[in-house]
Amino acid sequence: MTPANLPEEFQQITADHQFVFACHPGVSCFTECCRELDLALTPYDVLRLKRHLQLSSSKFLEQYVIIEWDEQQLFPICYLTMIDDGRASCIFVQETGCAVYADRPGSCRAYPVGRGASKNDGGSATESLVLIRELHCRGFEEANEQTVSNYLLDQGMEQYNRVNDILLPLLQHPRIQQQVFKPSRQQLDQYILALYDLDQFRREMIAGRIALQRPLTPQQLSGLTGDDVALLSLGLHWLMQEFFGE
Ligand code: SF4
Ligand code: SF4
């Protein structure tokens, strides 16, 4: 999105931008931002949440996620469930705050900062940042000045960004950007399995029902024995093979 067509409350910023903001249980708007929102989860969000709740990925998806897909979009989107309480509140919001705070999704951590990333030729990611000033958010009235990069660091975004960016070679593959790739039904299922339903993906791999053309590296092997981030990376490799023959 270019600066010209950003919504009014979005301001394009850089990581060294200074802003005044704090969020804590004492703000009058506490938990207002946890209602009436579309919260799309990344694979790493699901990994952290299912681990926090000590659920298998399949159970977590079944209990807490609505998966949406239609012909207009390339891949399915996993939305966190909102409850029907007249305010469309997040399923995890409580009087005292977020019930999964230590493992809350990346977009909740970063708010009121939003981040987009694109892959550049060298393989690293270039990020674009926006500051979102919504009327209900009183955190901008708190006397606490910081840079955007320090704020994101304090919110634990480094690990979230690092793992989310692993997926850029798939999500921004040249065949997607040239609009010559349209996943089949089977590939849509593979996408959810390998990126979101990690425990099931691990079972399928171990049972030999998924074949990789190249031998597993030691790091990929550790995904099969319990390292969920390594497994996510393995899932990405499988999807690149199945979608693009790489
Ligand atoms: S996950 Fe937590 S921080 Fe995010 S919207 Fe829900 S209650 Fe709020
Ligand atoms: S609306 Fe803003 S200040 Fe209020 S709880 Fe949410 S992030 Fe914090």
Image (cartoon, rainbow, N blue to C red):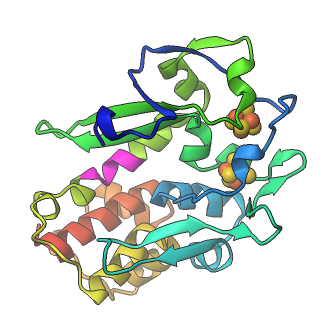
Question: Is residue 91 depicted above or below 158 in this figure?
Answer: below
Q: Quadrant of the C terminus?
A: bottom left
Q: Which SS type dominates the magenta stretch?
A: helix
Q: Position of residue 201 (x, y in %)?
A: 43, 77
Q: Position of residue 198 (x, y in %)?
A: 48, 70
Q: Is residue 165 magenta?
A: yes
Instruction: Return the residue nearer the eye: 89 or 126.
Output: 89
Q: Is residue 64 left or right of residue 194?
A: right
Query: Magenta stretch?
Result: 164-168
Residue at point 72% right, 63% down?
A: 53
Residue at point 32% right, 54% down?
A: 167
Q: Quadrant of residue 222?
A: bottom left
Q: Position of residue 85 (x, y in %)?
A: 83, 68
Instruction: Return the residue nearer the eye: 37 or 100.
Output: 37
Q: Quadrant of residue 75?
A: bottom left
Q: Is residue 112 magenta?
A: no
* Farthest-out residue, right: 95
